[in-house]
Amino acid sequence: MNTRISGLLLACLSVVSYPVLCDPAPAYVDRFFMGLSTLQADFDQQVVDANDKTVQSSRGHMWIMRPGRFRWDYLTPYKQLLVADGERIWSYDEDLEQVTVQPASEVLTATPAMLLSGSKPLGEVFTFEELAANRVLLKPRSDDSNITTLTLAFAQGQLSELVAHDAFGNTTTFSFSNMVRNPHLQQDIFHFQVPAGADVVGDVD
């Protein structure tokens, strides 16, 4: 996957793609995810390293269709696209004219957090700890995850922020706005066509 897109993004996408939550998830977490089939929102993403230096700041729009489909359009500072079509995950860097493609099954099992889009209940992958009203800390049950914690924040019933910390000391924060729950989405949003002339890394057959 393109190095300018944080690897933590896939973990975050899996969180908002997972269909069933289990106890002991707080009630407001259950209320958000239960009955959720599609989602769209604008996002701002910021990555801060272990020295509290901002190493990436970007924004764009995302669409989710459960199970296993998502599309994130990065508009700034570089135009990039991340699409999961249910079978493969495509990453396209417009400036580099490069496409990276991987089977979803390989990517989605790369870390415990990625299991959220699979068959395991969220409660089997994470423990929960409420930090404050409408804010919950998730810790991977597995010791081999690069992700140490995920924090979800909710406002007026919507997911407003997701903060991920990794084992290298990086913090990735996604802030969501203009969120629409269960909009009607066309399937072709999640279809990726390799642009003419682009280099392809991975197997597209």
Image (cartoon, helix red, strand yellow):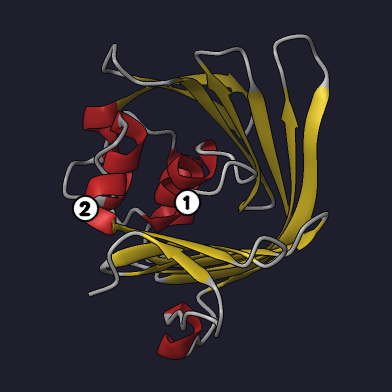
Can see residue 177?
no
Secondary structure of the residue carrying numbered label 1: helix
Could you give the CA–CA distance between mark 1 and mark 2, rounded to whole angstroms?
A: 14 Å
The amino acid type of the residue labelled 1 equals: Leu
Where 160 falls versus 172 (above or below)? below
SS category of the residue bearing label 2: helix
Q: Residue 17 occupies which quadrant of the picture?
A: bottom left
Residue 75 locus on image (x, y percent): 77, 64
The residue where tag 2 is placed is 105
> Disc 1 designates what residue?
13
Q: Is residue 52 visible?
A: yes
Q: Examine the image and state in which quarter residue 95 appears.
A: bottom right
Q: Residue placed farthest to the left in the image? A: 119
- At horizontal 45% and vertical 79% (from top left) the residue drawn is 192
The answer to which of marks 1 and 2 sits earlier in the sequence is: 1
Residue shown at 27% from the left, 64% from the top: 203
Q: Find residue 79 and report its horizontal and vertical position in percent.
A: 73, 64
